[in-house]
Amino acid sequence: MDYFNTTDMEYEEVPEAGESHGDYVELVRSDMVDIDRVYDLAELFKIFGDSTRLRILSALLNHELCVCDICEVLEMNQSAISHQLRVLRTAGLIKVRRSGKSAFYSLDDDHVKKIIEMGFEHINEKN
């Protein structure tokens, strides 16, 4: 039985209390993302869950910066910034470009920028 009308996006029948919509539940299960991908996404969001890392990413939104400049922008010591840069780089969120003895950091790609911008957009619409 088709419990869900996709055009109205509402249940067509209301089951008794405690009764599930078996066919609909199976449809939802078949549309869900693989559990391993969910775990990967949870790990990605953990990286975004640190305010220092988010500050670094926001500094890199439109600018390539060296470690010294990131330290100055965030008013933090190089050890703390280097640690967070290593976490961000390992997660594939930033990339490094070497020029002589200097290393310049930037966002890895537009997906990272979009995630950050969409997050800020979401919290800004709540205010």
Image (cartoon, helix red, strand yellow):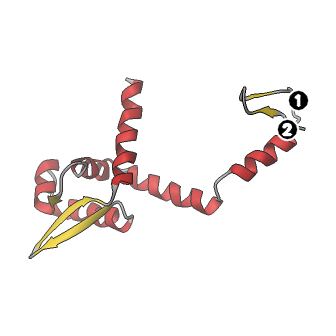
Tell me the residue at 87%/34% (across/down). 18
As drawn, which residue projects farthest toward the front? 7
Quarter of the image containing the N terminus?
top right
Quarter residue 44 falls in? bottom left
Residues packed near mark 1 inside 10 Å, few (<14), some (14 to 19) or many (20 plus): few
Q: Mark 2 highlights which residue? A: 21
Measured as percent of width and height from the top left, residue 65 is found at: 15, 58
Marks 1/2: CA distance? Answer: 7 Å
For the residue marked with disc 2, what is the amino acid?
His
Tell me the residue at 40%/26% (across/down). 125
Q: Mark 1 highlights which residue? A: 15
Q: Is residue 13 left or right of residue 37?
A: right
Tell me the residue at 14%/62% (across/down). 66
Residues packed near mark 2 inside 10 Å, few (<14), some (14 to 19) or many (20 plus): some
User: N-terminal of the two: label 1 or label 2?
Assistant: 1
Measured as percent of width and height from the top left, residue 57 is found at: 28, 51
Q: How many marks?
A: 2
Q: Is residue 56 left or right of residue 31?
A: left
| Mark 1 secondary-structure assignment | loop
For the residue marked with disc 1, what is the amino acid?
Pro
Tell me the residue at 74%/52% (across/down). 30
Q: Is residue 110 left or right of residue 5?
A: left
As drawn, which residue projects farthest toward the bottom? 100
Measured as percent of width and height from the top left, residue 122 is found at: 41, 33
Quarter of the image containing the C terminus?
top left
For the residues bearing labels 1 and 2, Cβ distance under 8 angstroms: yes
Q: Which mark is residue 88?
A: none
| Mark 2 secondary-structure assignment | loop
Q: Is residue 123 left or right of residue 99?
A: right
Could you say which is closer to the camera, residue 101 or residue 72?
101
49 w.r.t. 125: above or below: below
